[in-house]
Image (cartoon, coloured by chain):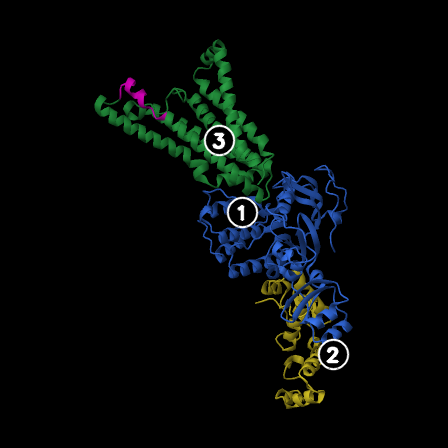
């Protein structure tokens, strides 16, 4: 129920767009399904409708959502795929760079980090190249 | 971004025909508006344009003229000079314009012997688009029985009743003056939720004064910051929050890094230094900050307002750029 | 006419003040007077002899109580309801017109009710005990038209007195109200002085007007207060 926290240095509409994107990637909104409207987002997060609209429009601009006149916003057929490609591109900046920076602060080498990653229980699950476990409705594309 | 004030001596004849274009005349427009109570000049030349369908936050310390500003727009008190138009027309004694406004004061006077019910029965005659169901829902969510005498309302209930009227009025120009006074966090959440539902379903201009800046920051589209009878800043909320960057870390590192920047405020806790600088960081600068183990964050609206010395005098006095002694007295 | 109606409805939404108080007061005075008449009747026998009946008419008390109530209720109305109407997007002019209409209705209800009770009084020969409650010199000595006009004029005078002083308070503050009261007393005293000075004219006018005299004076006073409240209202602020 709380608004997306302004934890980063990004405007709130980007945070909200990311949150909706997270839900699309997790399969909560499969392709062809409707996402919450501007009003619903605005009321739920208690944010200005203009901000909620900007978040949705950003996803429309990236072809993740499409507007159906009089009905609302729907996830496009390749919405999840678009997001995955995008996020993979951002993986380096969003996760790898901070990880390495933190490792350096802790006096770890890059090799230490690689070893740490491989020893992590989650590493085994990520060896499969596809993402069928996270996006079951992706078969159509 | 900063709105410069015009010569406060500018006078214009009230009711003079407005010659501005339709684009600029839509909404509320103020030009060189001043207001004095006796020898005290509360508004010192206000230029402001509020567009239709937007939510504005009106920020500033107590006594800077926030309530007076709203009162002169609605002609509840008379301005001393300047021009005000709502949708291109002078609002004073203009029934067609004023019927589209709703401004229940924070200390609204009610007839002592009236019940909530008496007011609610009259309201549909005041507003063409009055929402009886919404009024009913809000009253029950705020737990105000219709048979309550108005003089028996607690501080919180007075605020809640004002919120109920303001939202259900669907007035195109709605003024909310510290609407949360006496409301507990749960009731404030109800208010914020219903306010957002209303403006999402039916866009309308809301001018809301508030001291709970961070709590209300996400509700607003634009902020109007007042200081001593003038408008210090009027801008998009995102624009304001991205106009500064908060940098935090070990003192030497922070001081070294921020040396070339325009530092707005700084605070320290032991060896940790938190500094607000003007502008956003370029990607290479961000990398440099990271290399120095500095955290880079977007500051909250409240932090920025405080740093600008607008929020309150106690904070303002600690800031180097604000050496004037705070003015006492006049409540906005 | 639509805009003043909004203030009118706000005024009328409190029916006790706007409608019921005057009739209830008339009935209370009627009841008290009849009870007093019955008690007196135990000594003198019923119906009361005319000399006894005229000594305890409660109408003077009623009129003063009603006037006091009307003054305070309209002063409160212009003070508080004014702020409410402006909050709800009304204009000062429409507030004044709506409230004035409301005062008119309240006064009219009082006048109609008093006249109707006078009719019952005549039919029942003084409530069956020979007590004239409404047929007193103060209200027109049993003349329907004079009674109607007198009650209307008293009520309007009281309501607009409250409105005038209440509006002066809204526009210029508490000190101005005190000054206005002092001013009003001085003006009335001045008028009385002139009337005494020109006593032949005064006596002749009083004879000509007869039972209409109190009504005419009240109506003149109401008119002055109405004008004062109208003019001052333009300067009133929340």
Q: Disc 1 versus disc 2: distance between alpha carbons?
A: 56 Å
Q: Which mark is residue A89?
A: 2
Question: Foreground residue, C87 or B182?
Answer: B182
Q: Which mark is residue C159?
A: 3
Instruction: Provide the chain ID for the residue under circle 3.
Output: C
Marks 1 and 3: same chain? Answer: no
**Where does the image place residue C97, in percent across and percent down from the top left?**
56, 34
**Rendered shade, chain C:** green
Q: Disc 1 versus disc 3: distance between alpha carbons?
A: 27 Å
**Where does the image place residue B117, in percent across and percent down from the top left?**
47, 47
- Magenta span covers which residues? C48-59
**Rendered shade, chain B:** blue
Residue at 68%, 60% (x, y): give it: B237
Q: Could you say whether the residue bearing mark 1 is in a helix, strand or loop?
A: loop
Question: Foreground residue, C162 or B330?
Answer: B330
From the image, which quarter does the C terminus of chain A lie in?
Answer: bottom right
Marks 1 and 2: same chain? Answer: no
**Given contact means CB atoms under 8 Å apart, are the residues at marks 3 and 2 in contact?**
no
Q: Could you say whether the residue bearing mark 3 is in a helix, strand or loop?
A: helix
Is residue C187 shown above or below B187?
Answer: above
Q: How many marks?
A: 3
**Location of mark 1 (residue):** B107
**Where does the image place residue B219, in percent across and percent down from the top left?**
62, 59
């Amino acid at each position: 129920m709380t608004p997306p926290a302004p934890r980063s240095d990004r405007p709130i509409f980007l945070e909200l767009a990311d949150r909706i994107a997270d839900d699309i990637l997790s399969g909560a909104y499969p392709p062809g399904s409707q996402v919450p409207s501007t009003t619903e987002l605005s009321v739920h997060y208690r944010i200005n409708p203009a901000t909620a609209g900007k978040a949705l429009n950003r996803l429309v601009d990236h072809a993740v959502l499409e507007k159906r006149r009089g009905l609302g916003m729907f996830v496009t057929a390749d919405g999840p795929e678009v997001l995955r490609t995008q996020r993979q591109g951002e993986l380096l900046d969003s996760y790898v760079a901070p990880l390495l920076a933190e490792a350096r602060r802790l006096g770890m080498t890059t090799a230490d980090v690689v070893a740490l990653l491989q020893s992590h229980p989650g590493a085994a699950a990520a060896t499969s190249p596809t993402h069928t476990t996270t996006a079951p409705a992706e078969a159509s594309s | 971004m900063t709105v410069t004030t015009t010569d406060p001596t500018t006078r214009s004849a009230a009711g003079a025909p407005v010659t501005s274009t339709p684009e600029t005349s839509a909404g509320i427009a103020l030009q060189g508006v001043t207001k004095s109570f006796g020898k005290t000049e509360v508004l010192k030349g206000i230029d402001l344009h509020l567009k239709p369908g937007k939510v504005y936050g009106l920020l500033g310390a107590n006594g800077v003229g926030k309530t007076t500003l709203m009162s002169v727009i609605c002609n509840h008190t008379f301005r001393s000079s300047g021009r005000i138009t709502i949708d291109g027309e002078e609002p004073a004694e203009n029934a067609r314009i004023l019927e589209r406004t709703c401004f229940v004061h924070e200390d609204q006077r009610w007839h002592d012997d009236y019940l909530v019910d008496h007011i609610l029965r009259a309201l549909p005659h005041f507003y063409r688009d009055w929402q009886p169901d919404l009024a009913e829902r809000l009253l029950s969510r705020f737990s105000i029985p219709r048979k309550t005498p108005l003089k028996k309302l607690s501080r919180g209930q007075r605020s809640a009743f004002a919120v109920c009227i303001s939202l259900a009025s669907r007035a195109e120009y709605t003024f909310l003056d510290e609407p949360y006074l006496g409301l507990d966090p749960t009731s404030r959440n109800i208010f914020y939720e219903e306010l957002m539902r209303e403006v999402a379903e039916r866009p309308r201009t809301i001018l809301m004064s508030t001291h709970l800046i961070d709590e209300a920051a996400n509700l607003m589209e634009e902020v109007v910051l007042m200081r001593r009878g003038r408008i210090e800043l009027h801008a998009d909320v995102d624009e304001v929050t991205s106009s500064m960057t908060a940098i935090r870390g070990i003192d030497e590192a922070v001081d070294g890094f921020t040396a070339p920047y325009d530092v707005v405020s700084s605070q320290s806790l032991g060896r940790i230094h938190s500094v607000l600088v003007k502008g956003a960081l370029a990607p290479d600068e961000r990398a440099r900050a990271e290399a120095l183990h500095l955290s880079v964050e977007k500051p909250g609206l409240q932090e920025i307002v405080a740093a600008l010395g607008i929020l309150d005098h106690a904070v303002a006095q600690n800031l180097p750029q604000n050496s004037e002694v705070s003015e006492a007295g006049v409540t906005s | 006419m639509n805009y003043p109606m909004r203030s009118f409805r706000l005024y009328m939404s409190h029916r006790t003040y706007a409608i019921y108080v005057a009739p209830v007061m008339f009935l209370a005075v009627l009841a008290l007077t009849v009870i007093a008449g019955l008690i007196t009747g135990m000594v003198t026998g019923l119906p009361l002899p005319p000399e006894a009946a005229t000594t305890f008419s409660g109408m003077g008390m009623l009129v003063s109580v009603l006037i006091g109530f009307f003054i305070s209720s309209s002063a409160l109305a212009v003070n508080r309801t004014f702020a409410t109407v402006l909050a709800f997007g009304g204009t000062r002019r429409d507030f004044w017109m709506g409230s004035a209409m409301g005062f008119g209705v309240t006064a009219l209800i009082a006048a109609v009710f008093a006249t109707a009770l006078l009719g019952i009084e005549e039919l029942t020969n003084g409530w069956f005990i020979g007590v004239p409650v409404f047929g007193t010199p103060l209200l027109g000595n049993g003349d329907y038209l004079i009674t109607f006009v007198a009650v209307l004029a008293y009520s309007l005078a009281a309501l607009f007195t409250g409105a005038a002083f209440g509006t002066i308070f809204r526009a210029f503050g508490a000190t101005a109200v005190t000054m206005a009261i002092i001013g009003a007393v001085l003006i009335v005293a001045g008028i009385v002085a002139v009337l005494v000075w020109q006593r032949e004219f005064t006596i002749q006018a009083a004879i000509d007007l007869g039972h209409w005299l109190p009504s005419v004076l009240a109506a003149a006073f109401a008119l002055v207060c109405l004008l004062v409240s109208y003019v001052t209202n333009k300067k009133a602020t929340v």
